[in-house]
Image (cartoon, rainbow, N blue to C red):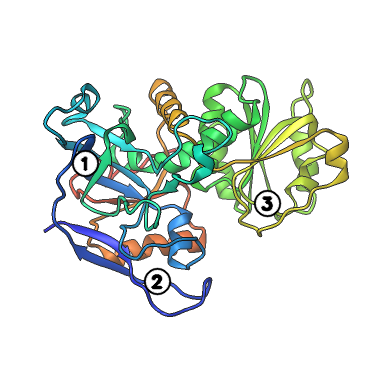
Amino acid sequence: MPYSLTVKKIEGKPGQVYYPLQLNEIPIPTPGPGQVLVKLAAASLNHRDLFVRQHLYPAISFTAPLLSDGYGTVIELGGPSPSPLAQSLLHKPVILTPSWGWESDPLGPENNGRDYGVLGAGAKHETGVGQEYVLVPEDEAFLAPEHLTAAEGAALPLVGLTGWRALVSKTGEALPGRNILVTGIGGGVALQVLQFAVAIGCNVYVTSGDEEKIRRAKEMGAKGGVSYKAKDWDRQLGAMLPKERPWLDAVVDGAGGDVVGKTVRLLKSGGVISSYGMTVGPKMDWLMQAVLKNVELKGSTMGSKREFKEMVEFVREKGIRPVVSRVIKGIDNIEGIDGLFDDMKAGRQFGKLVILIDKEAAGGDSPSKL
């Protein structure tokens, strides 16, 4: 019998509890009309999964499998007359959309988000990719870029979609020669934003509390970086900007905190701060100085299916390989998976943390090198 991975409910307050992982035997499902059956080769972790285990995420399901990011092969089609789309996917490697219910509206999920939900231990859609086989609607599976290993393919969906929307859809500054600041380099979304922006031809600058992460970001194409532990990091960054364009066009931020106060002096008039998270705290200051400079603060979440398709095509065209920090083998390797969560809690990772569900799949012994 194949396995699925869920969280086990125990008593405890949100933020104090840490739900243990639970392995379950499940039957192989049968696809219905409009569905495809995917044999998963790899899945990856996101901070969302850590928040689920800490009960810091809403509407948790203790029966739906964990994890949002999956890569696998379509092995069976549903219905007596599968569509041409489904037939084009049969026996092909695919990557799966990490959320359902948002088709194409650039402003946000249609129907005011009533049908929208992220996969993985969520009550909205009782589906997750922390299992060996998964049923998905045929239009939620996309042919994987051919150059990606299974581990790299599993590393892409959620962070790729989030980063694409935050940079491309939200800032309007994803253009050659623009100066883009990416905060908190080392996290999955920040690294994808870096890769996208470099491939577009932007001048990318980064922040981190770890000098080694800044060094590695430079090897990936960043023009420079500063430690946010330095009180004058904004001044240090200003000195790095090119003389012919001595300002920031946009900031892509996942930290929050004092990012407005630190960057408003550097941002051009009408510059954009695209915020996809607040790891420092749930609030951030908004300054009158930003108002006077016409700076725009834009919240950004994951994205639509249309944006996911655009992102995947860009990755295919540019040959981008998502950065994989560490890989363990086996959905039944509870100790190893707990170790990946420990890496995330400690902030040790530089890139994505991946589970090879198919232990023989490509990428287990050679995660992405910089």
Q: Is residue 129 visible from the viewing direction of this image?
A: yes
Quadrant in which the C terminus appears:
top left
Residue 202: quarter of image: top right
Disc 2 and disc 1: Cα gap in Å?
27 Å
Q: Is residue 200 left or right of residue 123?
A: right
Mark 1 secondary-structure assignment? strand
The residue nearer to you, when weighing 306 against 355, is 306
First reached walking from the N terminus: tag 2 or tag 1: 2
Mark 3 touches mark 1? (CB < 8 Å)? no
Marker disc for residue 20:
none
Q: Residue at x 70, y 57 (%)?
A: 283
Write down the residue under mark 3: 256
Write down the residue under mark 1: 38
Q: Is residue 20 above or below residue 46?
A: below
Quadrant in which the N terminus appears:
bottom left
Disc 3 and disc 1: Cα gap in Å?
37 Å
The residue nearer to you, when weighing 350 against 317, is 317
Write down the residue under mark 2: 19
Disc 2 and disc 3: Cα gap in Å?
27 Å
Say which amino acid is labelled 2: Tyr
First reached walking from the N terminus: tag 3 or tag 1: 1
Say which amino acid is labelled 3: Gly
Q: Is residue 253 left or right of residue 112?
A: right
Q: Is residue 24 above or below residue 241?
A: below
What percent of the width, then of the height, locates residue 78? 16, 36
Q: Is residue 284 left or right of residue 114?
A: right
